[in-house]
Amino acid sequence: MQTVTAIAHPSLAFVKYWGKVDHTLNIPANGSISVNLSGATTTTTVTFDAALNVDHITINGAPGEHLRVAGHLDRVRRMAGIDARAVVESRNDFPASAGIASSSSAFAALSLAASRAAGLNLDERALSILARSGSGSACRSIPDGFAEWLPGADHASSYARQIAPPDHWDLRVISVVVETGAKAISSSDGHRAAATSPLFQARLAALPHALETVRCAILARDFAAFGAAAEAEALSMHAVALTSRVEGCDWMTGICYWQPGTVRMLKAVEDWRRGGLPVYLTIDAGPNVHLLCEAQCQAALEAELDALLPEVGADAHYFVSKPAPGARVVGD
């Protein structure tokens, strides 16, 4: 056993995963398609030490029990046939629990670092399955570039595989951070509530077409088809959230992840497109907005965004990403 440091990037979904058929195994109700964001990184170091009596886990400088992390370490220990406790230090360079898929990069990096430190050398599929066990979307942060999560029917068949490598398409994602705080309703609670929406089954019925459209558009580098499908799919997911009922929250009529700055960005994207700037957006389960454009439009889009940002919020800011590699060990 040894000390291993791994890094991973959050996976931004163009076709969203929303709702589960198995909440224990994180088996999704539908497949999804995503890309890894180069502008955001989780770095995680794991050391197994037989002299320790308990796990020591620190996330973004805050030590604590961090039960989901400890539970994931238990999965690795069972796979490796060891019982040593671990020291885990993990840090994000972007806001967590704010709709930027922080759990995807967190559990991808943890899965790789912990499995290697425990003496395992998992292939990509096995590593994706392990990462999914910790957080569903983490399975998509394992492959390089653009990935598709095959929903599967059981633990062995639900994993992500690459659609195209990072250099396949010079796409840009400009992530506009409207709010940095943690959202009031977690993604886990949102997944549990999804099936209560009267729109849930209609969305599931439309998803095979959305998956095919987005997959083909990525492979063909057809930005207009890709952007329109990704934006419509994001709004479809949020329509389900807005019409879902959260158990124990009877005072809520639905889950609204948006903030005023979110809506301002929605209207701005429509205005920019009407004016001839080819830009689309997607929004994960949170208030923050991801703008999609090709590389040749980045400068024009940033100029528009810089002028708009004071209207979005006093603390609003953004970062730019290209398609990124998957989870990897530092030094590999």
Image: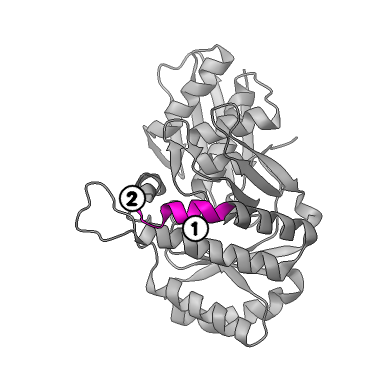
Inter-mark Cα distance, 2 to 1:
19 Å
The residue where tag 2 is placed is 196
State the quadrant of the C terminus: top right
Residue 143 placement: quadrant: top right
Q: In this picture, which residue range is highlighted in magenta? A: 197-207
Residue 111 visible? The answer is: no
Task: Relative to 34, say whether 275 is above or below.
Answer: below
Q: Nearer the viewer, residue 242 or 203?
A: 203
Q: Residue furthest left?
A: 251
Q: Which residue is at a point 54% across and 61% down the rendered structure image?
A: 233
- 83 sits left or right of 229 in the view: left
Q: Percent x, y for residue 36?
A: 65, 51
**Residue 108, disc:** none
Circle 2: element type: helix
Mark 2 against mark 1, which lies toward the viewer? 2
The residue where tag 1 is placed is 284
The type of colouring in the image is: one colour
Query: Which amino acid type corresponds to the residue marked 2 in the rendered image?
Result: Thr
Q: Residues within 10 Å of mark 1 (few under 14, many from 20)?
A: many
Q: Which residue is at a point 71% across and 49% down the rendered structure image?
A: 145
Q: Nearer the viewer, residue 102 or 266?
A: 266
